[in-house]
Every structure is written in C-alpha cells, then in structure tokens.
Amino acid sequence: MTWTGGCLCGAVRYEAEADPMRAVICHCVTCRRVSGAPMMCFVHFPAEAFRWLGSPPKRYRSSPSAERGFCPQCGSTLSMHESVLGDRVQVALGSLDHPERAGPDDHVWTKQQLPWLHIEDDLPRFPTISAAVPSRAVEERS
C-alpha cells in the first residue's frame, strides 16, 4: 500500500511504499512545543521505502540526537529524525493524506503528560520511552 502526505501549503510532499512499522503518541515537552498541541503522534516508515517528493523539509536540531522537519514555506511540522533510529522516517500523523488509516501503538513520555489531558484507550503507556525501540531521549530529557 502507498502512503502519502505533506504540509499544509503542499510545498513538501512525501510517499512511503511500505506500511508503517509503528506509530506512537508522545507527550513530551519538546513535541508539545514543536506542534503547539498537547501531544503529538508520529508514524514510523522504513527509510528504504520512504521518499520526499521534490524538496525535503527544512530541519531543526531539537536535541543532540534528533532533528525535526518542517515546511520552510508554511511551517507545518512534518517529521522527526533520530540518529538512533536511522532505519526509519517518522512523520507527523496529521501530515498523512489519510491519517485514519494509521493507529498508534502506545503512549510515551507520559510522565510529562498534561494533567488535564485524559485519553481513554487501551494502549500501553510508558513514563519515558517505549521498550519497542531504542532511544537516547532518556539521557537527554531526564
């Protein structure tokens, strides 16, 4: 199945020729600040099956081991690139053309979740990172 997406203005587009590896809802402070939302969901696609159509997003180094991708034209948050997860590209769920096709696997960084935010689902929750993927975020955010 082909997955497509892009920014608000259409200047940056992408496609993935493989289904997502996973999707995660992150409650960390950095994701809140970059998105302007109470949490952010990233969908992980295999890097070898993913490509930017035309110009890739501009990147901002948000931590020593991660960069955030955004459209230089409209500012839409598009991606996250973690050095420890070089086998994948993480795109913002909301940037998918059909976000309803992707579902999250778990919640991470719940120790930083806003106290008034209550999400009723049966997904696993982790105070920091998920056991499913490696991360350097613990050392950087602890």
Image (cartoon, grey):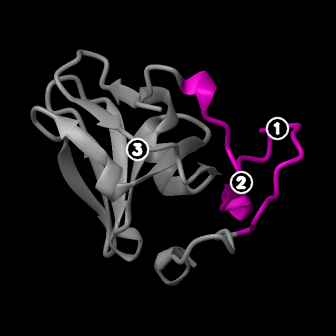
- Residue 115: horizontal and vertical position, in percent? 79, 47
Q: Is residue 112 above or below residue 53?
A: below
Magenta segment's dominant SS is: loop
From mark 3 to mark 2, how far is it between C-alphas? 17 Å
User: Which residue sits at x=16%, y=41%?
Assistant: 56
User: Which residue sits at x=57%, y=42%?
Assistant: 41
Outermost residue, top side: 9
Q: Is residue 72 above or below residue 86?
A: above
Is 118 magenta? The answer is yes
Tell us which disc is closer to us: 3 or 2. Answer: 2
- Comparing 50 with 72, the one in front is 50
At label 3, which amino acid type do we have? Val
At label 1, which amino acid type do we have? Ile
At label 2, which amino acid type do we have? His
Indicate which disc residue 107 carries: 2
Q: Are marks 2 and 1 in contact (CB under 8 Å)?
A: yes
Q: Which residue is mark 3?
A: 34
State which region is magenta. 99-127
Query: Badge 3: few (under 14), some or many (20 or more) residues near its Cα, within 10 Å?
Result: some
User: Which residue sits at x=41%, y=70%?
Assistant: 85
Label 2: which secondary element? strand
